[in-house]
Amino acid sequence: MIARRMMLSVWFMVMTAGSAACAARLPDFAHIVRENRAAVVNISSTQVMKGVVPGFGFGAPEGPGGPGGPGVPSNPLFHGLPHDKQANPQQFVTKSLGSGFIIASDGYILTCAHVIDHATQVIVKLADNQDYVAHVVGLDTKSDVALLKIPATHLATVHIGHVSHLQVGDWVLAIGAPFGFENSATSGIVSAIGRNLPGSDYVPFIQTDVPINPGNSGGPLFNTRGQVIGINSQIYSRTGGFMGLSFAIPINLALRISHDLKTNGHVQWGWLGVTIQDVTRKLAASFDLPKPYGALVSEVLPGSPAAHSRLQAGDVIVRYDGHPITRSSELPPLVGFSPIGTTAHLEVIRNGHPQTLSVVVGALPETLPVSYTRPSHKPRHNASLGLALRDLTVHERRELGVSRGVFVDGVSQGPGEKAGIAPGDVILSLAGHPVASVSAFMTILAHVPSQHPVPVLIHRDGSSVFLALTK
């Protein structure tokens, strides 16, 4: 009996010590909340939307009423919530709830652009229940960052952290107003860094498993030192609520944007004028690369900065101003941060050989010209590979915005279908050789080795993309 009691006593001491050690390793979230809750604000805005009812979307995950918002590309994994009021079939009055945080004691506040976009009035409510009508200093929809100003002084502010110190697995904490429940705190870990999302090419998101829901948008994401390292912006969801993945805008990017908004009222993003894609395993083999890496240039836009350089379609960009590029998503943020008018140095692989090129960074235009019209059907020319090809007329080339190529009139079972070529595509080049006609295509194809992938450049829906074709 005595021995048993001694064993139980030892077991209890070990368990207690283990629990204490585990607790010592966990962050003091309560302290972080106490120190920062006064600098976190609730934001409500009134928005009048015209046109059709905004659909579910990806890019403004917590727009009016919740995930999904106006003017974002459709994505079935990002759902919207119903608007508060429908005025008439052509106009909608909506209420948007979100969060924000004070970055300057004289009333400057950071939040997400989609929380206050198109707003006729923005109300900021502080932790002490005081509220103010906010002035929108500026917003940038490409990054989803907005800067507000309220007429108040001597306000509590957050402390800014450094994203460069962030690691996958680090603990993080969010404070906001999910579903309108003010000053709610949720925690989790960083699950990925530098995540690229559709429609947000210039933002290398911080991915976490912190529970984020409608109303958290624009709120701060803290590290364990109580420093803000991101703005909660998006969620990945099939239901409109949290499902394990949330995304935050890095604070260093947000602060740079807020400075531009405060100084100029708008943001100028750097631009090269190229269409890029990832290098797959088959594409790497077709370009004689040792492994899949870099950003493959599939198109150089006419009149762009890249068009005035030696950069060309088929180049694989592996380094930008000294920064290595392992995935295509890593290039746009680097270009976007580059000052307009500066010269960027690119290391590329062309035909298996490294080269260094220079491009003068331009300003990203508001709209990029995209035109695509499906040509009318004309007599087909049956080709091998399971492709039915025909030449393009001068008028069709002008409509499509291409200077050469052959039109894919039909696809049957064969190597072309396996490569991903589809009816309506225009083949621009094969194995690095420009294709001007069906006869030229057949001549090039005759010299293509069998059982070895070669790159084929196609024009589809207004843009160009490389595919790997094995004869």
Image: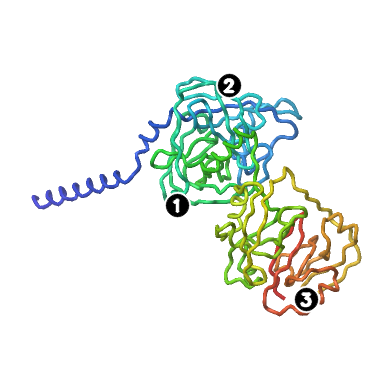
How much space separates mark 2 and mark 3, taking CA atoms?
67 Å
**282 versus 56 height, above or below:** below
Could you tell me the amino acid type at mark 2? Val
- Look at the numbered discs 2 and 3 and tell me whether their residues touch, using CB distance below 8 Å: no
Could you tell me the amino acid type at mark 3? Leu
Instruction: State the SS at label 2.
Output: strand
Relative to the observer, which residue lies in front, 93 or 125?
Answer: 125
Q: Quadrant of residue 298?
A: bottom right
Residue 111's disc is none
Q: Which residue is mark 1?
A: 168
Sequence order check, earlier mark of 3 and 1: 1
Residue 144, percent across and down? 60, 39
Relative horizontal placement of residue 365, taking residue 168 as reference (left or right): right
Judged from this view, the residue extending furthest toward the left is 2
**Total count of labels:** 3
Could you tell me the amino acid type at mark 1? Val
Instruction: State the SS at label 3.
Output: helix
Q: Which residue is mark 3?
A: 445
Residue 133's disc is 2
Front: mark 2 or 3:
2
Mark 1, other Cα within 10 Å: few <14 / some 14–19 / many ≥20: few
Instruction: State the SS at label 1.
Output: loop
Relative to the observer, which residue lies in front, 16 or 122?
Answer: 122
Residue 317, percent across and down? 63, 62
